[in-house]
Amino acid sequence: MGAHPPDPAEDQGARRAGVLHPADRRPRLVPRRPRPPDRVRPPPPAGALNNFDRVLPAPQSDLARETLKDPYIFDFLSLGPDVAERDLERGLISEVRNFLLELGAGFALVGTQVLLEVDGQDFFLDLLFYHLRLRCYVVVELKVGEFLPEHAGKMSFYLSAVDHHLRHPDDQPTIGLILCKTKSRLVAEYTLQGLQRPIGVASYQRMPEPLRGTLPSPAELEAGLGALKPLQPGREAVHPERVEG
């Protein structure tokens, strides 16, 4: 015998009674919730602009690129906004420990205003370092204004002179770092494209003058900590709400 089609009346009554018809037992497709969009992660902070990949061999270029950063934070300096380059240099040297910590591991200070004599003329490097991991000299030039293309030309000359007068045969090529208050990324990129010496360009930041004036100096902090008397054993600390008038 053939199967009789279901009676609509019986089918409706079965639904009211909670009885499912065999045709209703088929799996139902439940619409999936739309997947939330992936959170866009900000790109990692860019290091100093440089031409290391083009002018240095692969292992050295990678390590040099990781060594330099941008920006450098000089919050430990207490200088006015219109500071001269020599004053900036003196401030960094007076805080040389903090300066080296900000530069990163591996930097050893060789000297300041290092004299280079070329063809009877005297030239002075702002700061000269030797990097223990890179195995090379690092010349640092300080600029209190915006980066200009001619800064890189002067740095290229310094690097050639250091390689000729100071570099040991086992040393890697000398690297230059131009630290300026501000820079145009495009101007710096165009400038470095035509240079054959390894040079990086980075900016530095200092704490705004109004904010710096509201913070205690290291001497004031040390004096304040020295005025605190250690709690004697067996004595309970006094809470302000428990002090009787």
Image (cartoon, grey):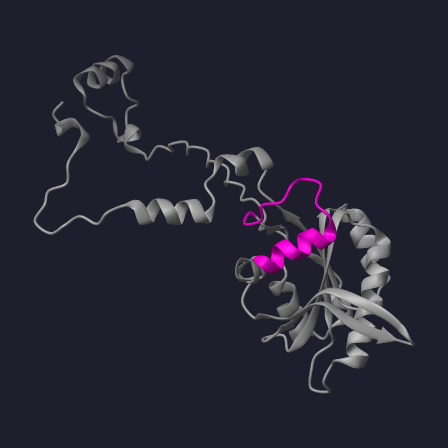
Q: Is residue 58 left or right of residue 124?
A: left
Which is more toward the observer, 172 or 204?
A: 204
Height in image: 42 above or below 36?
below
Q: Can I make out residue 196 in this image?
A: no
Task: Tell me if residue 73 is in the magenta stretch.
Answer: no
Residue lying furthest left = 234
Quadrant for residue 212, please give it: top right
Quadrant for residue 168, please give it: bottom right
Query: Residue 38's spot in the image, x, y percent?
Result: 50, 41
Q: Is residue 101 left or right of residue 3?
A: right
Q: Is residue 78 left or right of residue 6?
A: right
User: Which part of the image, by quadrant, shows the N terminus?
Assistant: top left
Residue lying furthest top = 9
Q: Residue at x 58, y 45 (%)?
A: 78
Which is more toward the observer, 126 or 222?
A: 222
Q: Residue at x 55, y 47 (%)?
A: 75
Q: Can I make out residue 12 in this image?
A: yes
Query: Residue 157's spot in the image, x, y percent?
Result: 85, 68
Query: Residue 242's spot in the image, x, y percent?
Result: 12, 29
The magenta span reads: 75-94
Report the number of discs: 0
Query: Residue 93's spot in the image, x, y percent?
Result: 61, 60
Quadrant for residue 102, please give it: bottom right
Q: Residue at x 78, y 49 (%)?
A: 147
Height in image: 8 above or below 58?
above
Q: Is residue 112 left or right of residue 15?
A: right
